[in-house]
Image (cartoon, grey):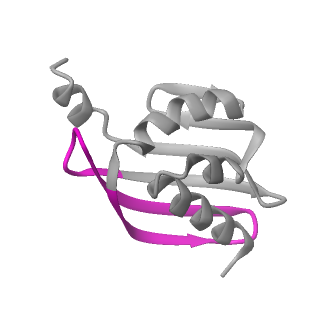
Amino acid sequence: MTAALETVLAYYEAWTSQNFDKAMHYIADDIVCQSPAGPIHGAAAFRAFMEPFSQKVTTSTLLSSFGDDTTALLMYDTVTTPVPHAPGAELHTVADGRITHLHLIFDRLPFAKARGEI
């Protein structure tokens, strides 16, 4: 297993098991996250964005993963309390065992429908 993939899989396991304190161990202080809602800068902003979602996850199935020494890509399907299938993909850049950049892709429409916005 490559260094980046090892880090990213440990991060994934932590946030999908609702242990966000452990997940944050793998996040760089100056992380940049490209999300469907726009860019997120810094660990505190990233936590404020991602932790509430992680608390809604009941199960997650890792569909695929691969990586090299500096990048890793995951694709997964989560089951959440508001939405029964919420697939996502994440492209990570890793340096010194921390995720410095995360490009997150997921469909926001099912969540908007669940909140009654559509």
Total numbered labels: 0
Any magenta on residue 80?
yes
Main SS class of the magenta portion in the image: strand
Image x and y of residue 43, in percent: 70, 34
Image x and y of residue 85, in percent: 22, 51
Extreme residue in the right direction: 96
Horizontal side of 103 relative to 88 (left or right) equals right
Q: What residue do we see at 41% from left, 42% from top? A: 55
Examine the image and state in which quarter residue 70 appears.
bottom right
Q: What residue do we see at 68% from left, 65% from top? A: 7
Residue 61 sits above or below residue 43 on the image: below
Horizontal side of 14 relative to 107 (left or right) equals right
Q: What residue do we see at 53% from left, 59% from top? A: 12
Extreme residue in the top direction: 117
Q: Which residues are magenta?
A: 59-87
Horizontal side of 53 relative to 110 (left or right) equals right
Q: Nearer the viewer, residue 4 or 20?
A: 20
Q: What residue do we see at 72% from left, 51% from top? A: 25
Image x and y of residue 103, in percent: 56, 44
Which quadrant would the C terminus be assigned to in this image? top left
Image x and y of residue 62, in percent: 40, 68
Which quadrant would the N terminus be assigned to in this image? bottom right
Any magenta on residue 26?
no
